[in-house]
Image: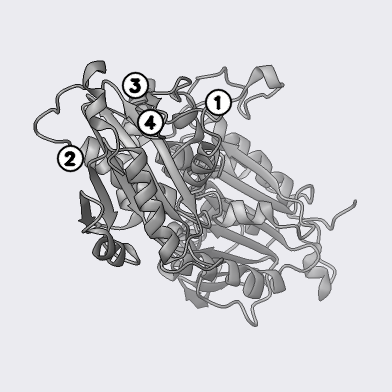
């Protein structure tokens, strides 16, 4: 389908003149001409070519993600607007960031570049309108307006909209309130400005799968985005016919604008951990990989054979474990809209933890009491039963403390995400084992919930798991229990 030329949007009011002849084919060419110290990399040249496609009408919606501090914002939010105004001095450009001050910084730099290189660029800033966040060209209709995500564009005609980093950091990207602010800004402020011929460029470091870039790609609104993601390390799968956006071999790191060596890239990967590396540096914060946990961390280390013996009376005995505990996460109420109740049995061998059993479901208070009794009867070895001391947990402890031994209230410290992040290295390192789905079909739900955490609809299984792993691996008993031998197993037959 034909699209309007980059900036025939101005034809809403008048027929624009032909683009001015300039000696720079791309914004990066301009950057080098204005500052010979400018570093060019294959990644930045790719971005520059894509920006030319925007200028010449071949792409109207462009989305770019790349590692932090590799020059993408400098290219897109500084050099690109300057290059555009030199060619199309009638363009009205808006620059948006998570905060007004950050957007204003780009406005100041564009303005100062034009003021310093007026002779080269052939344009100048009107001194009557030269505020860093809002100014016009002298003798032309071209202008730059800068605003934060919470700001408005009402009454500001826009021919080119640049959105650069709508999130300050991971905490803001995790905030439900800020995510709603960003989405509302897009639908209520940005979209009304995106008329025919108006181009939009989104540049960001990826944070979460549902950040602005992810959300826009997932929307079924008929907008066709060209998406350029440049991972720090080439991670394509040639067996699936995939190629790297920069033509690199698998495992090859990008040439860094900051001069990072392979060793420094690898050090950075170790420093930030897998979650941040996949999101910020690889641009792949997908639900399939998980925000805190990845599916493969569980599936790659799942066990296939039962770690217990089941007796005729229904009790189970697990051999060779240093300790075995139960961990419970309770619901507030037994309605369909509530969280589930989850009870798990875990064992520890040295520095490895094994999930042995689980009960899980929507339970009212009476059914919850029965579930605790049943799991305790099935696993008499799990003498310590940890119950989060909130919701129904306190009431369950009070009701059962005279009939079920070993109920221990746990006061959680920190947020759910913090508690999960604290134990995620053990899972990533292969110190945590769950049964495979053939042995325990219910484990699939646990893995799915963990992969979607903390955005999944429920987190009760994850809460029970992190509570158990915190106890077993972060705070193990100071003395080892005697390993249970076959001839000692009878003493663990349930008294229930």
Instruction: Determine which of the numbered discs, if any, sits on residue 235 in the image.
Output: 1
- Residue at 35% x, 55% y: name it: 416
> Foreground residue, 241 or 263?
241
Q: Which residue is mark 4?
A: 428
Q: Nearer the viewer, mark 1 or mark 4?
A: 4
Residue 150 vs residue 488: left or right? right
Alpha carbon separation for disc pair 1 and 2: 37 Å
Q: Nearer the viewer, mark 1 or mark 2?
A: 2
Q: Earlier in the sequence, mark 4 or mark 2?
A: 4
Q: Is residue 169 visible?
A: no
Give the SS element for disc 2: loop
| Circles 1 and 4 in contact, beta carbons < 8 Å | no
Q: Nearer the viewer, mark 1 or mark 3?
A: 1
Instruction: Determine which of the numbered discs, if any, sits on residue 263 in the image.
Output: 3
Q: Position of residue 432 (x, y in %)?
A: 35, 30
Give the SS element for disc 3: helix
Q: Which residue is mark 2?
A: 475
């Amino acid at each position: 389908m034909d699209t309007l030329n980059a900036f025939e949007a101005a034809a809403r009011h008048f027929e624009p003149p032909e683009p001015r002849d300039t000696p720079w084919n791309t914004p990066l060419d301009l950057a080098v001409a204005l500052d010979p110290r400018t570093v060019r990399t294959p990644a930045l040249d790719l971005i520059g070519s894509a920006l030319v496609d925007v200028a010449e009408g071949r792409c109207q919606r462009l989305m770019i993600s790349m590692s932090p501090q590799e020059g993408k914002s400098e290219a897109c939010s500084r050099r690109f607007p300057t290059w555009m105004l030199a060619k199309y001095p009638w363009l009205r450009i808006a620059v948006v960031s998570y905060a007004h001050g950050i957007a204003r910084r780009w406005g100041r730099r564009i303005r100062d570049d034009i003021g310093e290189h007026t002779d080269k660029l052939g344009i100048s800033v009107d001194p009557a309108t030269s505020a860093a966040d809002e100014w016009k060209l002298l003798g032309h209709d071209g202008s730059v307006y800068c605003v934060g995500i919470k700001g408005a564009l009402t009454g500001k005609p826009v021919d080119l909209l640049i959105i650069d980093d709508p999130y300050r950091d991971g905490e803001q990207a995790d905030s439900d309130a800020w995510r709603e602010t960003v989405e509302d800004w897009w639908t209520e402020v940005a979209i009304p400005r995106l008329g025919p011929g108006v181009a939009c460029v989104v540049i960001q470091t990826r944070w979460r799968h549902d950040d602005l870039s992810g959300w826009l790609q997932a929307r079924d609104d008929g907008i066709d985005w060209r998406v350029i993601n440049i991972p720090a390390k080439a991670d394509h799968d040639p067996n699936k016919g995939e190629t790297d956006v920069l033509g690199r071999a698998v495992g090859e790191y990008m040439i860094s604008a900051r001069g990072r060596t392979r060793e420094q890239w690898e050090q950075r990967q170790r420093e930030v951990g897998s979650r941040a590396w996949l999101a910020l540096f690889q641009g792949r914060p997908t639900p399939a990989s998980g925000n805190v946990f990845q599916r493969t961390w569980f599936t790659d280390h799942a066990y296939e054979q039962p770690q217990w013996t089941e007796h005729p009376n229904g009790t189970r005995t697990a051999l060779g474990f240093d300790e075995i505990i139960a961990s419970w996460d309770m619901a507030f109420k037994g309605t369909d809209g509530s969280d589930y109740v989850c009870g798990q049995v875990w064992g520890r061998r040295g520095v490895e933890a094994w999930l042995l059993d689980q009960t899980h479901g929507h339970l009212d208070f009476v059914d919850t009491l029965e579930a605790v009794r049943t799991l305790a009867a099935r696993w008499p070895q799990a003498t310590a039963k940890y119950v989060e001391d909130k919701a129904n947990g306190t009431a369950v402890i009070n009701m059962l403390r005279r009939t079920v031994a070993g109920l221990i209230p746990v006061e959680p410290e920190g947020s759910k995400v913090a508690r999960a992040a604290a134990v995620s290295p053990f899972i990533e390192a292969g110190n945590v084992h769950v049964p495979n789905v053939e042995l325990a079909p219910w484990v699939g739900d646990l893995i799915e919930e963990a992969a979607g955490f903390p955005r999944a609809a429920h987190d009760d299984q994850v809460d029970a798991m992190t509570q158990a792993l915190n106890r077993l691996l972060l705070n193990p008993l100071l003395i080892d229990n005697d390993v249970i031998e076959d001839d000692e197993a009878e003493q663990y037959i349930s008294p229930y």
